[in-house]
Image (cartoon, rainbow, N blue to C red):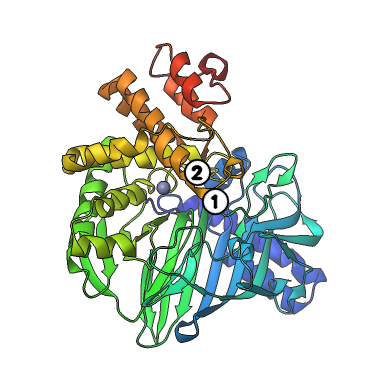
Amino acid sequence: MVDRCAGRCGIVVCMRIILISAAALLVVCISCGLVLLFIFSSSQTQLSAEEYNSVQKQHVLYPSYDLDINLKYDEHRIEVIQKVEVWNTLQEPIPELVFCVEPDGYENVMILESAEITGEPPVRLDADLSKGILTIPLESDVAVGKKIAVTLKYSLNLFFIDSGDMHPYGNFAYAENVIQCGDFYPVLNPWEPGVGFRRWPFHPIGDPVVYPLADYAVQVHAGKDVIVAGYGFVSKKDNVWKFESKKARSWAFAASKEFKTLTGGTREIPITLYYYTGNEAGAAACLKAGEEAVGLFQEKFGPYPYKNLVLVENGYYSSMEYSGFCTISHSHMDLYSKSYSHLLVALTAHEIAHQWWYGGVGNDQVTEPWLDEALAQYSEYLFLAKFYPEFVSWWQQNTNVRKVANKYIDNAIFDYRDRGDYTRIIYGRAPAFIQELHRILGDDVFFAFLREYYREMTDKFATKEDFFRILSRHTDKDLTVLFAKYFRVFPDMDKWGK
Ligand SMILES: [Zn+2]
């Protein structure tokens, strides 16, 4: 990951002068307490002028999150003070803030205590939390180029998961020896130009959250015997664990009193793996697979987008990707340690591939879940073919899916009637499309396309249109038969141009 301010200090100074002027203006007409609020807000701003212009062109917002988490480990509960700063980098005013709140999709998990404009004194806001959507109307619009900071206070009563549970159920939950928390905080939804914030009701299939890029500063207050694992570790002092992550899609953590660690990777991309006693064999295999996957995907797709990689044995059946951080299936770690299991290494490669396809190149996982999953799942195949060829026939069987309710892969998560159907299409049919494309294009063209797609769309939201627009630069072959087989809405490469 590139340091966001490196090499742009002059521009950064220029932007701060403008902001300090804006705050000084407030001194004339507003009480001293509020002036402090705006000076505090200004100091959190991370965007340089160049980055501001870049995000404005993309019609996106770039929030920064400050999460102060009080982890009550033995009570299976967290209390959170979340500050969100949003700079209006759009070309229109913002009348409200709308967040996706996955925990609200489950009963008796999240309790929202308050929403306020950050400051001394804070200004209380009316917030409506319903069906996983948090809407906060603002007293006045946030004008273009201005900022707003809000503070949310809430707590989560985590529920118990067992080793057979699947995501998204249990992304924020506790098991016998771990608390896992991903997708646990309100995430500012993407903005649709001329329309407003997008909103969708919670749907317990696939990944029901969409993550625009953001900066994170996190503090976790934990008991003295609790180990907290997360991406961007900065320091631990007096049982307060600090983390920072910039240009991230998401931030997640896991905590346990029983974590052991293994370290590996390279000097450029160190890998830390957290696991439990008894799973030494699985942990060693997982770390080895992690090292192999990072090396292969860098060679095939482009540079890894973060500074390091943290892998954590979780408490359930699924594995899950977050920026610079993957939770790896406890079930398969356990199974591998008892009897050699192909799924452990395959899942490890899959989640790591998401660092490119989800982390680097973002996409709308609610309306176009195939876009990152097809590539992550096919990356799994590339990984197995190179390092574990004995597992390729197993992978191939899983992708050769015929008995599905709907053969098309370009569906939103709402189009799937159940989790099994989603799994068969997204992890079976979608990578089969990529595999056929690879076969038709051949190695040289296929990987040149993927590298360009990665380079051009890193730090952005890719869509189906971007995928085919960039593909069209690399081939003149007639792909109509292939497209008709997999897509409900036919990709017209001539129309989408290059
Ligand atoms: Zn995936």
The answer, for residue 301, to whether it is visible in the render is no
Residue extending farthest front: 403
Dot placed on the residue nearer the N-terminal end, 2 or 1: 1
Closer-to-camera residue (310/418): 418
Instruction: Give the x, y percent position of residue 378.
Output: 34, 37
Instruction: Give the x, y percent position of residue 403.
Output: 45, 34
Closer-to-camera residue (168/30): 168
Question: Disc 2, disc 1: CB below 8 Å?
Answer: yes
Residue at the spot x=55%, y=43% of the render? 364
What amino acid is found at the position of numbered circle 1 in the picture? Ile
Residue 416, compared with residue 14, is above or below; it is above
Q: Give neighbour class at mark 2: few <14, some 14-19, many 20+ (Cα, 10 Å).
A: many
Q: Give neighbour class at mark 1: few <14, some 14-19, many 20+ (Cα, 10 Å).
A: many
Relative to residue 211, is residue 273 drawn left or right? left
In the picture of the structure, the residue carrying the numbered disc 1 is 205
Relative to residue 485, is residue 143 drawn left or right? right
Q: Quick one: SS at disc 2?
A: helix
CA gap, disc 2 and disc 1: 7 Å
In the picture of the structure, the residue carrying the numbered disc 2 is 422
Residue at the spot x=59%, y=70% of the render? 82
Which of the 4 image quadrants contains residue 328?
bottom left
